[in-house]
Amino acid sequence: MNHSAILETHDALNERTLIADPARIADLCAYLKHDEKFVRLSAVTAVDLHPAEPRFEVIYHLHSLDKNERLRLKCRLSGGDPEIDSVYSVWRAADWYEREVFDMFGIKFRNHPNLVRILMPVDWEGYPLRKDYPVHGYKYSYPTEQTIEQSTE
Amino acid sequence: MKRVLDDDPVATIPAPAVVPETPASPRLMTLNMGPQHPSTHGVLRIMLELEGETIRKAVPDIGFLHTGIEKECEQKHWQQVVTLTDRVDYLANLSNNLVYALAVEKLLQIEIPARAQWTRVMMAELSRLNSHLVWLGTHALDIGAMSVFFYCFREREDVLRIFEMFSGQRMMTSYIRVGGLALEPPRGWEKRVGAFIRGFPSKVDEYEELLDSNPIWTRRTQGVGFISLEDMLDLGVTGPMLRGAGLKWDIRKSEPYSSYDQFDFEVPTRTENDVYARYRVRLSEMRQSARIITQALEGMPEGAWQADAPHVVLPDREKMKTQMEALIYHFKIVTEGFRVPAGEVYQCVEAPRGEIGYYIVSDGTSKPYRVHMRTPSFGNLQSLGVLLKDTLIADSIAALGSMDFVLGDTDR
């Protein structure tokens, strides 16, 4: 595998991870699908490394049926206004996977045909799987230890 | 009372100008199916655009059962997450337990004893039977064959009783834990499982006879719900749908886990690629699962049912009461949970519906940093638009049922 968009290669626990250049992800994916026979896009997800920078990692799990091999692609994005190219043109499976990542992390996918929320209601505010999003949401505010102390004083 | 025709207000309204209907722009009717439609088996809404009785466009709308399980996983200790994985797919809870346990064990790098691995295989296969039985019963019910439902649920009840015997729970078993099993297999389990599995293959013949001798069933399933293999691979479909299109791919064979490589079984495939082919594939899978369970029953190894990893597995009750070290481990595991070395792992298993893949990131603490669940129903449901395009609305129920999705699994 030799492509200029691959920045680093890691092998751990019998799994291969490629760190890819986010600006050239669609190009790299097309190469991997057509030349390296990774016909399946198994999953797309993201990890929020808040407060570290670059904050987001977008992760693609690829699978080749011919070679019986799996591959993980990772793109690092900054937290300000995370944007990356959609890989919908390579695998149509990316449609819902990328919508889910957008819904949960607020990462925008350029050239996606229908980038709207998929699991949360369309008018939802905030991105639930971000680390700075409280687990009970913003809508309800449960008493914290501080507010209990204040109310008893 | 006699009405005077001249004063009839209807008669005075001029006739509307006739708009000639051009064949190039047919009139489409939008129909909302769900979210409470019984054949969606959960809460799924599909927006159908119909031209007469033909579906021109189908857009699924999901998210009604979204409960934020992935977010919840980040708040729990590693072992507590097992109970959440049960609730992802309530028909294949043991497959979800298994994939999570395998992933965390890969990060921990602990060895699981053979007896625990074989019991896991047996339980996962029983879970597959449970899922396929519910699928077959409800799918036949949707198409109109009511009695099959009762037969399938009769056997499903036996499977649930076996689960109850092993774990104390019928559905949310949480039986497969990180480091082994939740409890030692109970005394006399061989007898109960043996009695069930000896009679089971003849029950599968019974379903087959009931359905295949029914001309309505064969007419409503054969040649219905075609979707090309290329489309399915491109859209992220996994599991029996691919095998119904002739692709011999099963993760139990291609990437064996939990000692599946020691079992002798086949991967059934069909080439028709329709609703009937998917039914035949699942029927054969039930027979193969019965074979695996029989082998597990006959060759079950002796030995420990939990890993030799005192920092992960709770100590024996007697040891805890007599040994200081065991008491300390018990206290540490119960209060703060065990720590998992930093790293990331993707583990997948062949669930009844297809590939379940858990991607887990650990930052070295006692809680997962991120758990992503790649669930088979989510990938499979994505192909719905292609599957239903240009089919008759009456066939849509058969086509939907053949996908075998669980909405809890889709929305998480």
Image (cartoon, coloured by chain):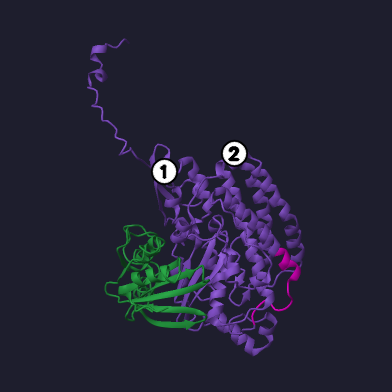
| Residue B17 or residue B141, whichever sits in front | B17
| Element type at mark 1 | strand
Chain B tint as drawn:
purple
Q: Is residue B74 magenta?
A: no
Where residue A112 sits: x, y (%)? Answer: 32, 62
- Give the residue drawn at x 31%, y 67%: A108
The amino acid marked with disc number 2 is: Ile
Q: What residue sits right under mark 2 in the picture? A: B216
Q: State the count of labels.
A: 2
The amino acid marked with disc number 1 is: Ile
Where residue A8 sits: x, y (%)? Answer: 39, 83
Q: Is residue B300 magenta?
A: yes
Mark 2: give few (<14), some (14-19) or many (20+) Cα within 10 Å.
few
Identify whether B407 is placed above or below B177. Answer: above
Region rendered in magenta: B293-307
Circle 1 marks a residue in which chain? B
| Element type at mark 2 | helix
| Residue A74 or residue B182, whichever sits in front | A74
Chain A tint as drawn:
green
Residue B37 visible in the displayed image:
yes
Where residue A58 sits: x, y (%)? Answer: 37, 73
The image quadrant that residue B93 belongs to is bottom right
Where residue B336 sits: x, y (%)? Answer: 52, 81
- Quadrant of the frame with the N terminus of chain B: top left
Report how far apart the C-alphas of labels 1 and 2 lie in the structure.
22 Å
Residue positioned most to the bottom: B324
- Give the residue drawn at x 29%, y 35%: B22
Q: Is residue B150 left or right of residue B143?
A: right
Q: Is residue B251 left or right of residue A129?
A: right
Q: What residue sits right under mark 1 in the picture? A: B55
